[in-house]
Image (tube, grey):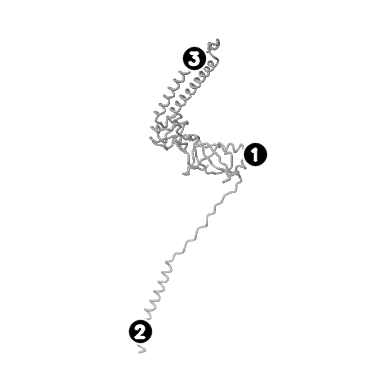
Amino acid sequence: MRQYSSMMLSRLLPKVVLAISFGAACSCFSGCEKEVPPTPPPPEVAVASVVQKDVPIQSEWIGTADGYVNATILAQVTGYLSEQSYREGDLIKKGDVLFRIDPRPFQAALDQAKGELALQQARWETAKLNLKRIRPLAESNAVSKKDLDDAIGAEQATHAAVLAAEAAVQKAQIDLGFTEIVSPIDGVAGLAKAQIGDLVGTSQDGELTTVSTIDPIKVYFSISEQEYLGLMRETAEEKEVRSKRSKNLELILADGSVYARKGAFAFADRHVDVRTGTITVAAFFPNPEQILRPGQFAKI
């Protein structure tokens, strides 16, 4: 039995040794597969030389564009709109007809005023002839002094009636002219706020449209009270420099682009807003391409 066990052990011992060697070899092989991480490169360090120099001080404000002149178009007589003579958004010249009101009632009023004027002129002529006849008779005591006074009074009254009738004719002519609603300025016409057939001229709130001059265009922005006081306390030399800078204002539009033309300071408002502690300032910018429109926001 012992001999048999020795024989079995002698047979199994080489296999165990082989298994242990194979396992060790596998362990060594697996260890060889692991990669060593690379050494990180040295960090980059930015280096700059320190230089002493003057740099410009820039300020930035939020501005709102507005027309150089904004004309609110209202009807000056009461009537029904019969025609819109312009296209919304068009460039309008001073004197161009924007709307027409039905002129027939105003033409009738003018004709009536002319008829009344003719009647008063005829009465005045009669009174003048009557006074011409009575005056020599009164000098010769052929008529009483009262007759002369009555004739003089009649002539003066009819003359006054003629003047009133002439004024009525002039008023009727003006009203007839107001049936053509014209633009008082050059500019861009806005949306029509009344339609053909509307009764207009019944109130001061009856705005028909607005015409705005936009070349040049105003841009309003606000500066703080501290900035304003600092500007007012500048020396003469500083004011001269600022005067040159104030003619070189830059406008940054809503899309981030810089407007091609430079602007110039125009004026400051008369008062500081007590609610915000700021004062409103205006600048003028050339706008021949009509890129800028009233109501746009921009940075100054």
Residue at image mark 2: 8
Q: CA distance from mark 1 to mark 3?
A: 82 Å
Q: Choose top left, top right, bottom left or bottom right for residue 177.
A: top left
- Please state which of the two labelled residues, at mark 2 or mark 3, is closer to the viewer: 3
Residue at image mark 1: 235
Residue at image mark 3: 130
* Amino acid on which the number 2 mark rests in the picture: Met
Where does the image place residue 106, in percent across and percent down from the top left?
42, 28
Give 12 or 156, whichever is nearer the viewer.
Answer: 156
- Please state which of the two labelled residues, at mark 1 or mark 3, is closer to the viewer: 3
Give 299 or 103, whichever is nearer the viewer.
Answer: 103
Where does the image place residue 299, in percent across and percent down from the top left?
51, 43
User: Element at badge 3?
Assistant: helix
* Amino acid on which the number 3 mark rests in the picture: Asn
Q: CA distance from mark 1 to mark 2?
A: 115 Å
Comes first in the chain, label 2 or label 3 = 2
Residue at 43% x, 33% y is 78
